[in-house]
Image (cartoon, rainbow, N blue to C red):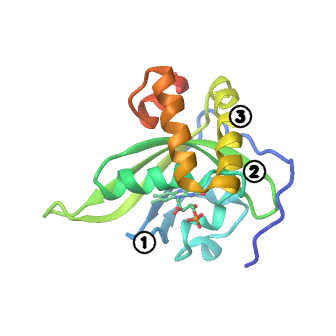
Amino acid sequence: MSKPIPTNQERVMNVDDFIVSKTDLKGHITYCNEIFMEMAAMTEEELLGKPHNIVRHPEMPKAVFKLLWNYVQNGREIFAYVKNLSADGSFYWVYANVTPSYDHNHNIIGYYSIRIKPNPAALEIIKPLYAKMLEIEKSEGVDASVNYLANVLKEKGVSSYDEFIINIQG
Ligand SMILES: Cc1cc2nc3c(=O)[nH]c(=O)nc-3n(C[C@H](O)[C@H](O)[C@H](O)COP(=O)(O)O)c2cc1C
């Protein structure tokens, strides 16, 4: 399936909805709930077994996903704001929690994500931040964007992206 051309059409999550998905260790989708399919405008058949970047929006900075994978591969959960792309080109913002899943021997066997509607006030902080990070990635690369984010967090007096995100979601 070729990537849709992004439009300015937004889909907004309902306050009582949860978008859920699970992946294997490589980030291939092994489960998604009804609301996931509805928001992504894709069928279960189109989603299962596919890399999770199937809903990746080109306006998302790479640095956010770099952090996400760093956290979960090291056994930590992460909270993040993510702009996702639907099959019809529309987009939807989510407040995501991504966690590793373990077997009885404490080996990571996959990943799990639950997403809820983001706080609209938090998105007004996130949108310009991500736009700036994207611009830096295009001119200087992803490491420069990671450094920029680290400096922004330092100026705000928070120790991690995660803490910052949890604070602004409220
Ligand atoms: C459990 C889980 C959920 C994820 N959910 C999303 C998501 O909703 N949207 C997204 O763009 N990437 C999501 N990712 C990250 C993707 O695997 C991928 O790293 C990201 O889309 C960047 O793709 P790229 O490396 O091709 O640029 C998720 C990863 C995991 C492990």
Q: Nearer the viewer, mark 1 or mark 3?
A: 3
If the image is split into quadrants, where does the N terminus sit?
bottom right
Going by the numbered disc 3, the residue's amino acid type is Pro
Residue at 38%, 29% (x, y): give it: 159
Instruction: Indicate the secondary structure of the residue bearing disc 3.
Output: helix
Earlier-in-chain disc, 2 versus 1: 1
Q: Position of residue 104 (x, y in %)?
A: 15, 62
| Quarter of image, ligand 1 | bottom right
Kindly tell me whether mark 1's CB lies below 8 Å from ligand 1. Answer: no
Residue identified by numbered label 2 = 91
**Along the viewing direction, whichever of 71 and 144 lies nearer the viewer:** 144
Can you see residue 19?
A: no
Above or below, 52 relative to 164: below
Q: Which residue is mark 3?
A: 128
Query: Along the polypeptide, which appears first: circle 2 or circle 3?
Result: 2
**Residue 129 image point, x, y percent:** 65, 35
Q: Position of residue 93 (x, y in %)?
A: 67, 43
Q: Amino acid at mark 1?
A: Lys
On the picture, is 164 further left or further right than 17?
A: left
* Residue drawn at point x = 42 percent, y = 71 percent: 26
Marks 2/1: CA distance? 24 Å
Q: Residue flagged by tag 2: what amino acid is it?
A: Phe
